[in-house]
Image: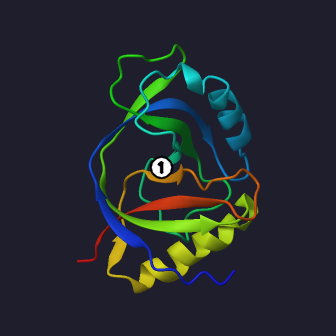
Amino acid sequence: MGLNIEPRIEEISKKKLIGNRLVMSLSGDRTKELWQGFMTRRKEIGNPVTTNLISMQVYDRLLSFSEFNDTTQFEKWAVVEVEDYKDLPSGMETYTLLGGLYAVFVHKGLPSSFPGTAQYIYGEWLPKSDYELDHREHFEIMGDKYRNNDLNSEEEVWVPIKRKN
């Protein structure tokens, strides 16, 4: 995949999120289970800010690209951004994304081609950029152009960064 895209660099403020989470790894992928459970109950969340869906990964420590492998455990969240936590459906959880500086890439195509996008971001763009990975949440926003398992699908990949010293 000839991915030669410059990301946009964006500073975001904190976001209030509601949704579900599961602990998983790439080899023990439970993404489908997570999203199926979330989507059946999504309408119970009464105060979404947008119709966007957010897939978020939370790691317990800062990992280098070379350290991350198929068995690395992380929390994956299926969430939407909300105005406040007043209407919390039972069994769902809140999460406050602190915000900060992000490099935002657009992944086009099928989920199966995502490893190529990740290789470009972490293996090519990041080492050559003025930034390094920061220990905060990674997330993808699936907005209007997102289509499940569609070649023309687009989603935004938000990578937490900070300026290199």
Q: Residues within 10 Å of mark 1 (few under 14, many from 20)?
A: some
Q: Residue at x 44, y 65 (%)?
A: 104
Is 66 left, or right, of 114 in this rendering? Answer: left
**How is this picture coloured?**
rainbow
- What secondary structure is marked by label 1? loop
Residue 51, image x, y percentages: 51, 39
Is 30 left, or right, of 9 in this rendering? Answer: right
Q: Nearer the viewer, residue 38 or 154?
A: 154
Quarter of the figure that contains the C terminus:
bottom left
Q: Residue at x 36, y 72 (%)?
A: 132
Is 141 left, or right, of 163 in this rendering? Answer: right
- Residue 2, picture quadrant: bottom right
Residue 136, image x, y percentages: 37, 53
Q: Residue at x 54, y 17 (%)?
A: 91
Quarter of the figure that contains the N terminus:
bottom right
Q: How many marks?
A: 1
Residue 65, image x, y percentages: 53, 69
Residue 30, image x, y percentages: 70, 40
Q: Residue at x 37, y 56 (%)?
A: 135
Residue at the spot of label 1 = 59
Is 29 left, or right, of 104 in this rendering? Answer: right
Above-or-below relation of 16 to 136:
above
- Residue 96, picture quadrant: top left
Above-or-below relation of 139 to 119:
above
Looking at this rendering, what residue extends furthest in the front direction? 144
Q: Which amino acid type is marked by label 1?
A: Tyr
Q: Nearer the viewer, residue 67 or 3?
A: 3
Looking at this rendering, what residue extends furthest in the left direction? 165
